[in-house]
């Protein structure tokens, strides 16, 4: 019988997902903003939309930064202040438990999030495709530093060369970091289970990774609030908050 009022179909989907994960030698996970939404971080609505009341093109492009770096920094400093108070949620911790339960190197977490919450939850092998909000990068000497716990000026400068610093995140119109992307592609094509969590996966790079996993024979499991464009690519879909779905999935894996 289905547990806790679930439909038979929903229970069956959980069992299918668990059996895919159980037999997979390698797992790759792709996460997006949906995972962090339950930690209180607003999901960003995408190109052309608003992000915390600002137009994306005013705060998240290299052109915006060139035009008005103080404005962009004020926006990011507000996001950074917010980061110091947010904590990983049950979904993040479930993914950390999943990695912990697998042999070293058999689990790769690819994330589009810049909040660092996967690391805070305990995941170790993480590829941050869009950078990290806690870090800064010098526009002069390219030095990267972790300044997560500090309040920064509206126009912070490099202590070494004096050039303006920028958030070490990937903006619109910028390429993804080559090394992380190459590793993400390698992990995706080597896995037998590709788990998509909290991302609608209609845009690059998410969509490309899902197809690539499929072409290489991996089973795709989708965990999203509701069905998305990615659903037609998924072998199994589990719909609801990832902070509830993932702990339940990990619990099923533990109990068998
Ligand atoms: Zn510098």
Image (spheres, rainbow, N blue to C red):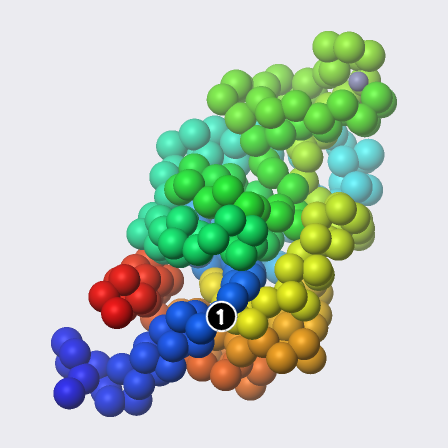
Left or right position of 62 against 22 = right
For the C terminus, the quadrant is bottom left
* Residue at the (45%, 81%) spot, across then down: 236
Residue 104 visible:
yes
Q: Secondary structure at mark 1?
A: loop
Closer to us: 41 or 147: 147
Q: How many marks?
A: 1
Image quarter for ligand 1 equals: top right
Closer to us: 17 or 64: 17
Closer to us: 4 or 62: 4
Left or right position of 7 against 101 = left
Provide residue 182's location: percent of width, then percent of height: 75, 54
Residue at the disc numbered 1: 24
Residue 141 to residue 71: above or below: above
Residue 56 to residue 2: above or below: above
* Residue at the (53%, 26%) spot, across then down: 148
Provide residue 101's location: percent of width, then percent of height: 38, 54
* Residue at the (62%, 17%) spot, across then down: 153
Q: Which quadrant holds residue 98?
A: bottom left
* Residue at the (45%, 34%) spot, across then down: 82
Provide residue 197's location: percent of width, then percent of height: 48, 64
């Amino acid at each position: 019988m289905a547990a806790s009022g679930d439909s038979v179909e929903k229970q069956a989907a959980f069992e299918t997902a668990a059996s895919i994960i159980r037999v997979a030698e390698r797992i790759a996970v792709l996460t997006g903003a949906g995972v962090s939404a339950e930690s209180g971080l607003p999901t960003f609505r995408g190109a052309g939309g608003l992000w915390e009341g600002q137009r994306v093109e005013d705060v998240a492009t290299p052109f915006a930064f060139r035009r008005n770096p103080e404005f962009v920094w004020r926006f990011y400093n507000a996001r950074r202040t917010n980061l110091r108070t947010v904590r990983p949620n049950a979904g993040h911790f479930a993914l950390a438990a999943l990695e912990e339960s697998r042999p070293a190197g058999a689990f790769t977490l690819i994330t589009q999030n810049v909040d660092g919450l996967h690391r805070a939850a305990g995941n170790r092998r993480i590829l941050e495709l869009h950078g990290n909000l806690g870090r800064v990068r010098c526009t002069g000497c390219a030095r990267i530093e972790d300044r997560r716990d500090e309040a920064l000026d509206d126009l912070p400068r490099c202590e070494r060369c004096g050039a303006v610093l920028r958030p070490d995140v990937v903006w619109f119109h910028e390429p993804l970091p080559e090394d992380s992307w190459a590793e993400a592609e390698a992990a995706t094509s080597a896995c037998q289970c590709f788990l998509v969590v909290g991302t609608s996966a209609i845009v690059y790079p998410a969509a490309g990774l899902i197809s690539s996993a499929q072409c290489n024979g991996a089973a795709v499991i989708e965990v999203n609030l509701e069905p998305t464009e990615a659903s037609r690519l998924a072998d199994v879909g589990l719909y609801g908050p990832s902070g509830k779905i993932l702990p339940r999935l990990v619990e099923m894996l533990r109990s068998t």
